[in-house]
Amino acid sequence: MVESLSSRKKYEWYRHHAWAGLGLLSVFLAIRYFVFIPNIISLPVIFILVAYILIALLQTYRYSHALIAEKELPVDLEKEKLKFIAEKEKLKLEKKKIKAELKARKKANKK
């Protein structure tokens, strides 16, 4: 499960960079459309951005198994997680109730 979380983070990171590379490439090509940039400058930039995008896409595919692992979580584990959250909320409410009682007692003792 821990590896799954790490893989999920890596997947999200590479996915972000693939989209960012596409955005940079789009902006560069738009600028190139309106402003003359010599091919000796623009072609290497384009090839570098395309390589950046392809590497990010390949790594995204490499870590995509994290998404599949998330979907295959056992139902029992999901139920346990929900029980844990419910118990945690119950403890929070109990703690608030105890604090309110203590506050009321202190106020009563002051009078």
Image: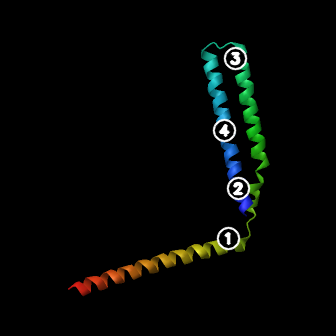
Distance Cα–Cα, label 3 vs label 1: 54 Å
Q: Nearer the viewer, residue 56 or 78?
A: 56
Query: Which mark is drawn over residue 6?
Result: 2
Circle 4 crowding by C-alpha within 10 Å: few under 14, some 14–19, many from 20: some
The colour style of the image is rainbow
Image quadrant for the N terminus?
A: bottom right
Which of the marked residues, 3 or 1, is nearer the chain's N terminus?
3
Mark pair 4, 1: CA separation: 32 Å
- 44 on left or right of 89: right
The reply to whether residue 70 is in sight is: no
Distance in Å between CA atoms under marks 2 and 4: 20 Å
Mark 3 vs mark 4: give the one in front. Answer: 3
Q: What's the mark number on residue 78? A: 1
Work out how far the residue at label 3 is from the one at label 2, CA to CA, in angstroms. Answer: 38 Å
Q: Amino acid at mark 1?
A: Glu
Q: Residue at x 66, y 38 (%)?
A: 19
Q: How crowded is the residue under tag 3: few (<14 C-alpha within 10 Å), some, or many (20+)?
A: few
The tag earlier along the polypeptide, 4 or 1, is 4
Question: How many badges with numbers are in the image?
Answer: 4
Quarter location, residue 72: bottom right
Q: Residue at x 36, y 80 (%)?
A: 100
Residue density around tag 1, few if under 14, some if 14–19, many if 20 or more, within 10 Å: few
Q: Residue furthest left?
A: 111
Label for residue 41? 3
Secondary structure under tag 1 reads helix
Residue 111's spot in the image, x, y percent?
Answer: 20, 86
Task: Answer with the quarter of the image where residue 108 lies.
Answer: bottom left
Left or right of residue 106, residue 92 in this image: right
